[in-house]
Image (tube, coloured by chain):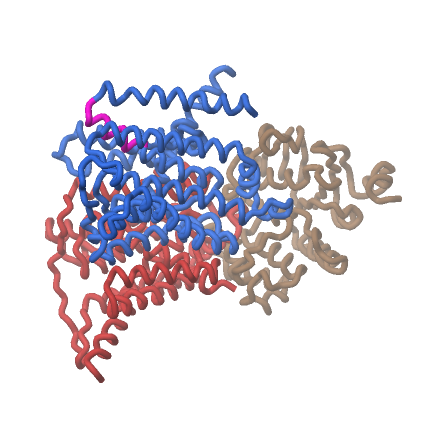
Chain colours: A blue, B brown, C red
Amino acid sequence: MKDEVIRRLGPLLLAVLGLAFVPFVTSDYVLHIAIQILLWGFVYTAWSLMGKFGLVSLGHGAFLGIGAYASPLLWNYTGLTPWLGIPIGILLAVLLALIIGYPCFRLRVVGHYFALVTLALSQVALLTIVAARDITGGSLGMTPKAVGHSWYALQFPEKPYFYAIALVAWAFGLCIWHLVDLGKGRAALEAIAEDEGAAASIGINVMREKLRVTVTSAALTALGGSLLSQYFMYVNPDTLSGIAVSLQIVFAAIAGGMYSVFGPTAGGLFTIALPEILRISLGTNFVGAANTIYGALLVIFIIFMPRGIIGWVESRLAAAPAR
Amino acid sequence: MLSLRRVSAGYGSFRALFDVSLEVAAGEAIGVVGPNGAGKSTLMRVISGMLRSSSGELVFEGRSLTRLPAHRIVEAGIAHVPEHRRLFAKLSVEENLRIGAFLPQARRHYAERSEWVYALFPRLLERRRQLAGTLSGGEQQMVAIGRALMSKPKLLLMDEPSAGLAPLVVEQVFNLVRLIREQGFTVLIVEQNLQQVLAIVDRAYLLEVGRIRLSGSAAELKDNAMIQQAYMGL
Amino acid sequence: MTRVDIFLLEAVINGILLGGVLALLALGLNLIFGVIDVVWICYAELVMCGMYMLFWLHVFFGWPILLACLAAIVGVAGLGALLHLLVISPILGSAPINQLLATGGMLFFLQSLATLLFGTDFRNIGLRLPVIELGDIFISYSRLLAFGTALIGAIALYLFLSRTYLGIAMRAIAQDREIMGLMGVDQRRIYLTTSAVGGALAGLAACLLVLQYDVHPFIGLSFGPITFMICVLGGLGNMIGGFVAAFIMSQIIAIGGYYFSIEISYVLAFVFFIVLMFLRPQGLLAR
């Protein structure tokens, strides 16, 4: 067991150490991209906690939106520090996860139905935010009151600060991933994914296992959302909630490979860096060209690499010695 | 009419049939018998194209049908009454028969064929509009056979027509098979129910663990000491 | 009758009229799900493509509107078949979620392609149909036309599915895929035909929607999500259920929009959907 922990933490520590030097050698622009990749990678990892056990949620846009809006709203209207605002956001997301998860799992809403029920959830979140435009600014979005460099307000105009925060959050997310992977719950969840009825009949508490992983995933997603809004200092319903965001999360996690620890992060690299590269290389002459290529690539990925980038690399590596 | 030459098949890495050769002449009724798991259903699925053989040849009326997809094999004139009937439970009896006549050449003769099937099984005429899933087991078997006959096949494959039916109904079903025979169809029938099937076929093959163990006329097999011992409890 | 009641009545009538088009979309999606067992997340984007086709053929190339409509229906039918051949058929054997996501990727692709080709401008076909006055109630002629055509489309689909060999085979395939070959049915051809018919229904919906709404690359998002909800509410693959659900949802939207705002009415519809999923997870009409 101890060896296993070292074997797993080794690569992660190496990655964190390596990435810690990035701010000293690159520009703010690269840092800006890197922060986004880390934060989104964190969110995608959170989603994959559910996804890899066959719980395909298209509702993570809702959890992300709650996290993203809770702390700026509390900060602007009550002056509450994000240090409390973020936990409140997480709590709300967990509550929502329970409200949706409990009846879903009780009534065995699975597969397509689970995906579509949660899809409705993310759209409810989006439309609620838009409808409450007097408070949230509607589809124009809102900005937390800026106070300059402040630990109390969790606002840092200098990029390296947020880079460090993003890196810690990301590493934390991967640790949770390992914990779930090593925990007793994993075998249970795999059995449930295989055959729910059979799992229940051998004494697995299906409800508890599913709820636990759902709540974990929702909480981490909300945390990711709040960090994203703190970093950007701007929230907008279309980029942080709703169906498009939910789909983006699922795409990235699957394109990267949801069965491997670094897979969702690879998905983050793919979904953040690729459109950025396409945007720069194609310029602004062709509005939509970057997204068109991106969309086509997504489809091609899903058809030809159903286990994602990392999954594909792993299967290549596994096949190589055999030849 | 139909000949299988050294046909092998399986599911994934599991092999269910080993070099099976078999002949059916026009107008004959042939039985394939054997214990559970001998590969009888696999054999039927290979002939009708539901499962692709891994090696060997399948020739029907001088034409090779080897590894053709199922819908092409029906076109060639082989109809398959699948195990457990597999009716479209939520379609009416009449709609089930129409699906059986899906092929263009069968559609042209739909009116005449369905009349003929209803004449053969008058019970179905009464229940024409009823959902197939609500019929009794024997009636369902009639629909399954009727559906297969709609394509005007030259050869009829029947996979365990008596499976899962009550003893009294089994008797009925074998009467149906006899009826079909009298209509001049060539029939290849797979059964576990040895005694019943040997009473209606001309010749039979004994399949064990994917291989043909014995073959001969129905009378020969009935008198075979090994068969009597292993399968008839005599 | 007080003034308020008349507006409410108008909202209800408009709700019924909107329900017709939504029912048409739900029928198409249900047909595809029932036969092929995939959910086309990009279904409403096919409608968007149809609307653009119509717009360009009619406004830009000056085709007569009816001919342009016909061309759009055929065009979207072709798109549906193409979508099946290029995206769905290579992954028919993989996990359902991958199929869902591949069509989700198509959603992004079609949206961005439309942005690339046509920009983000709102475009109007410039056809203004008169408004009918029934006493104090105003009903737009284009909505009435849309409702009537949607109803005719639905009836045509019903007749197709109950009377023709192809239609019966489509209903049968949902019950037992494996033995369809034994009936002489080539599954691949049925799938392709179904995709084309589903596309044609989207094309028809496009013709009806273009009379009421401006075209822009993201118009699909206004109809897509609600269509999924309707299909699930009615029971995925259950045509009659979807038809009924379309009218329930459109009433919630119409009446909610009357009392509150349009966003709130959609929130209400979605909340209604979620609650109902817990009461009847297999759909409204499930036994």
- Residue span colored magenta: A27-38
Q: Where is C256 relative to B177, above or below?
A: below
- Compare residues C132 and B70 and report the one nearer the observer: C132
The residue lying at 25 percent from left, 46 percent from top is A72
Q: Where is A203 relative to A162, above or below?
A: below
Query: How far across and how far down the image is residue A136, in percent?
Result: 23, 53
The residue lying at 28 percent from left, 44 percent from top is A81
Q: Is residue B176 left or right of residue A83?
A: right
Q: Which quadrant of the figure has residue B231?
A: top right
Query: How far across and how far down the image is residue A23, in percent?
Result: 25, 23
Task: Please say whether residue C46 is one of the residues in the magenta stretch.
Answer: no
- Compare residues A239 and A71 and report the one nearer the observer: A71
The residue lying at 52 percent from left, 64 percent from top is C287
Would residue B154 be seen by someone viewing this image from the given angle? no
Main SS of the magenta part reads helix
Query: How far across and how far down the image is residue B227, in percent?
Result: 83, 39
Q: What is the residue that sits farthest to the right in this orientation?
A: B234
Q: Which quadrant of the figure has residue B175?
A: bottom right
- Compare residues B150 and B84 and report the one nearer the observer: B84
Query: How far across and how far down the image is residue B204, in percent?
Result: 74, 41
Q: Where is C219 relative to B219, above or below?
A: below
Q: How many callouts does the rendering have?
A: 0
Would residue C2 be seen by someone viewing this image from the given angle? yes
- Compare residues C81 and A25 and report the one nearer the observer: A25
Quarter of the picture holding the N terminus of chain A: top right
Task: Please say whether residue A33 is one of the residues in the magenta stretch.
Answer: yes
Q: Is residue C125 left or right of residue C202?
A: left
Q: Is residue A39 left or right of residue B72?
A: left
